[in-house]
């Protein structure tokens, strides 16, 4: 124990000192020299070619504007065809300038270096995207809910914005933007900007995002989207067949906004709308400012999974307002957001629901920690220049981060902790921050003002130590404890499956039930459960995520057709990866998985396709 603590303290000291932690190793841009301060997009959406094509104009802010002589601007790109680059000073004439595109790196793409005669005020780049752009998913009408119109959506986080706009693709740089987007009439274009609920689908749209945002929050979607209001400032965009169900499921959105404002200050982004995408959306949700992108797999009819909305909404404070300066400090976005999410759930749905969700996520974190190398178990991650940030996505940033803030809340009490967090958001609004910034703020605003409550060693164990610190207090839930009893009774054959009183169970109880089943459970026992509860074929993504891997490992082959259907329909990585991992464990499963992937691949987002392929490739070796 001593050793681990000494290790954490040493690491902790290096968090504070390391100069590399200040820069973003996933971008070639040089923000200490020049920053994009505003961006104007003018793009045409071409579904036949699967391209976005047009111009982007960047307004530049140079750190040192007085130096004369040639200068260069370095931007991130991936798979973009750059047609020409122009630059100008003030309102002067646009002049063509030279540029070069470096060799493509599999993770970072191709650095674009623009040679400027002097420190110009703006550059304009004419370009087109590749049909394989990693940040765009192009869908045929058959892949949508409506079935008549094609659909496009972007996913820029972490480093995919560069595949559809040449820019400084780092969360350390913020810019405002305007956009003109042209597409076929009848299709609605939406962005992470000032969408108009009353817009006519005439094919020509203009957007403004007046608050400065980082590149990963740049977003676009085009499709046959309709709007339904939830409140004055909140609403849902979705394809017609999903619109009513989505609006009903997410009808508490306004209550969530109000609850968060009470805790952490005003919502600063004007409207808050949801865009419901097809099930192939690779994430649960994405906090694109003013317009969160949402998977339809959480629409269960009983609101049991609406914490996803609380999560994406919470990012309007933690992430979109106060942003991690690089992906090493992702816990500042996701850990804070998971904490705020749970506070919103508690405020709107009560403590019982919030506690159940806490127990479920802590169970998930413990399981994940068991298989992660110690270096990846820390909140403040070391620089990892060669690593794709999409692959570094673990529960550590989310749940250990959340747990740390809950720990601080318990230590200092809500009377002190709630205002502390609110001030953190206020003082760092529209800024990018590092773990060091948070530690300095914490020491100044909470520890120094409440002496004797928290030691540096305890803090170090949370920030720089692996695993769970000794000071971590586990969440408890009486309802989930009752599930443990029920499961145990059934496993020991004290009660028959029909005698279990599950009539009032919601998603979290089912998930908890499944997660506690022994790894070597026999196929006949699964048959028993399935007969009573019909897990196979469930439309609830969270249940499917847990059920299917169990069936695979138990050799319960009856579930295979429904599993294949689930994997073909859903593209949300978190939901489907566990099944692919389980399948890849045996040669027969691997063959089945490869076959399913072949059929599913066209409907998957590039991010999902890449992740699944990696698992199957590793198993085939
Ligand atoms: N910002 C994330 C999604 C993300 C993370 C995209 C990293 C790309 C890289 C979003 O807010 C999120 O955390 N989504 C979760 C929701 C869940 C934790 C409620 C998801 O998609 O599963
Ligand atoms: Zn998040």
Image (cartoon, helix red, strand yellow):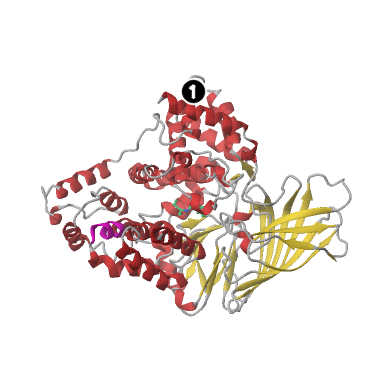
The x and y percentages for residue 134 are 56, 64
**Relative side of 116 to 551, left or right:** right
The x and y percentages for residue 364 are 36, 46
> Which corner quadrant holds the N terminus?
top left
Circle 1 residues within 10 Å: few <14, some 14–19, many ≥20: few
What is the magenta range? 548-555
| Magenta-drawn stretch, dominant element (helix, strand or loop) | helix
Residue 6 vs residue 506, the one in the foreground: 6
Quadrant location of residue 289? Answer: bottom right
Q: How many marks?
A: 1
Q: Is residue 7 visible?
A: yes
As helix, strand or loop, the secondary structure at mark 1 comes to loop
Taking 90 as reference, is 561 above or below it?
Answer: below
The x and y percentages for residue 105 are 62, 58
The residue pinned by badge 1 equals 455
**Relative side of 81 to 197, left or right:** right
Q: Does the magenta run of residues contain 85?
A: no
Q: Is residue 193 visible?
A: no
Q: Residue at the spot x=48%, y=80% of the render?
A: 148
Residue 290 vs residue 161, the one in the foreground: 161
> Which corner quadrant holds the C terminus?
bottom left
The x and y percentages for residue 229 are 50, 63
């Amino acid at each position: 124990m001593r050793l681990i603590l000494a290790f954490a303290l040493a690491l902790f000291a290096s968090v504070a000192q390391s100069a590399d932690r200040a820069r973003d190793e996933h971008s070639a841009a040089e923000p200490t020299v020049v920053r994009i301060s505003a961006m104007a997009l003018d793009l045409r959406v071409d579904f036949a070619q699967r391209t976005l094509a047009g111009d982007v104009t960047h307004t530049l802010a140079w750190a040192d504007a007085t130096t004369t002589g040639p200068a260069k601007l370095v931007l991130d790109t991936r798979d973009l065809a750059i047609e020409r680059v122009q630059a100008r000073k003030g309102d002067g004439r646009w002049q063509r300038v030279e540029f070069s595109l470096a060799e493509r790196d599999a993770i970072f793409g191709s650095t674009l270096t623009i040679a400027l005669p002097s420190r110009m005020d703006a550059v304009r780049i004419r370009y087109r995207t590749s049909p394989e752009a990693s940040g765009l998913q192009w869908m045929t009408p058959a892949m949508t809910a409506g079935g008549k119109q094609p659909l496009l959506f972007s996913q820029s986080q972490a480093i995919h914005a560069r595949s559809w706009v040449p820019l400084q693709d780092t969360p350390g740089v913020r810019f405002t933007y305007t956009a003109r987007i042209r597409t076929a009439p009848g299709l609605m274009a939406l962005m992470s900007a000032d969408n108009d609920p009353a817009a006519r689908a005439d094919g020509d749209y203009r957007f403004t995002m007046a608050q400065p945002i980082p590149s990963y929050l740049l977003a676009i979607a085009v499709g046959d989207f309709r709007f339904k209001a939830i409140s004055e400032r909140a609403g849902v965009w979705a394809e017609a067949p999903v619109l009513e169900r989505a609006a009903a499921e997410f009808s508490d959105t306004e209550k969530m906004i109000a609850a968060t404002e009470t805790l952490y200050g005003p919502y600063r982004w004007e409207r808050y709308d949801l865009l419901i995408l097809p099930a192939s959306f690779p994430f649960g949700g994405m906090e694109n400012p003013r317009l969160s992108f949402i998977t339809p797999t959480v629409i269960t009819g009983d609101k049991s999974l609406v914490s996803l909305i609380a999560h994406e909404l919470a990012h309007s404070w933690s992430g979109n307002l106060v942003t991690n300066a690089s992906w090493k400090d992702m816990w500042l976005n996701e850990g804070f957001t998971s904490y705020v999410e749970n506070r919103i759930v508690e405020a709107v749905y009560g403590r019982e629901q919030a506690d159940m969700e806490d127990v479920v996520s802590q169970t998930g974190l413990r399981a994940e920690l068991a298989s992660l190398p110690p270096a990846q178990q820390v909140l403040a991650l070391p620089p990892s220049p060669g690593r794709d940030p999409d692959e570094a996505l673990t529960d550590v940033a989310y749940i250990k981060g959340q747990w740390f803030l809950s720990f601080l809340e318990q230590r200092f009490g809500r009377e002190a902790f709630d205002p502390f967090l609110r001030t953190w958001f206020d003082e760092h609004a529209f800024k990018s921050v590092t773990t060091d910034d948070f530690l300095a703020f914490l020491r100044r605003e909470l520890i120094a003002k409440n002496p004797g409550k928290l030691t540096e060693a305890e803090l170090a164990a949370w920030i720089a130590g692996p695993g769970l610190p000794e000071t971590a207090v586990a969440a408890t839930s009486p309802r989930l404890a009752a599930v443990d009893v029920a499961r145990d009774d059934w496993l020991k054959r004290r009660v028959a499956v029909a005698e279990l009183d599950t009539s009032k169970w919601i998603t979290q109880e089912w998930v908890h039930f499944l997660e506690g089943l022994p790894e070597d459970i026999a196929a006949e026992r699964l048959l028993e459960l399935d007969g009573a509860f019909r897990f196979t074929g469930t439309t609830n993504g969270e249940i499917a995520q847990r059920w299917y891997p169990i069936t695979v490992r138990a050799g319960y082959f009856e579930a295979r057709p429904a599993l294949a259907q689930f994997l073909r329909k859903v593209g949300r990585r978190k939901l489907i990866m566990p099944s692919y991992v389980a399948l890849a464990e045996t040669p027969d499963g691997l063959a089945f998985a490869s076959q399913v992937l072949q059929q599913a691949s066209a409907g998957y987002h590039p991010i999902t396709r890449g992740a699944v392929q990696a698992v199957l490739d590793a198993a085939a070796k």
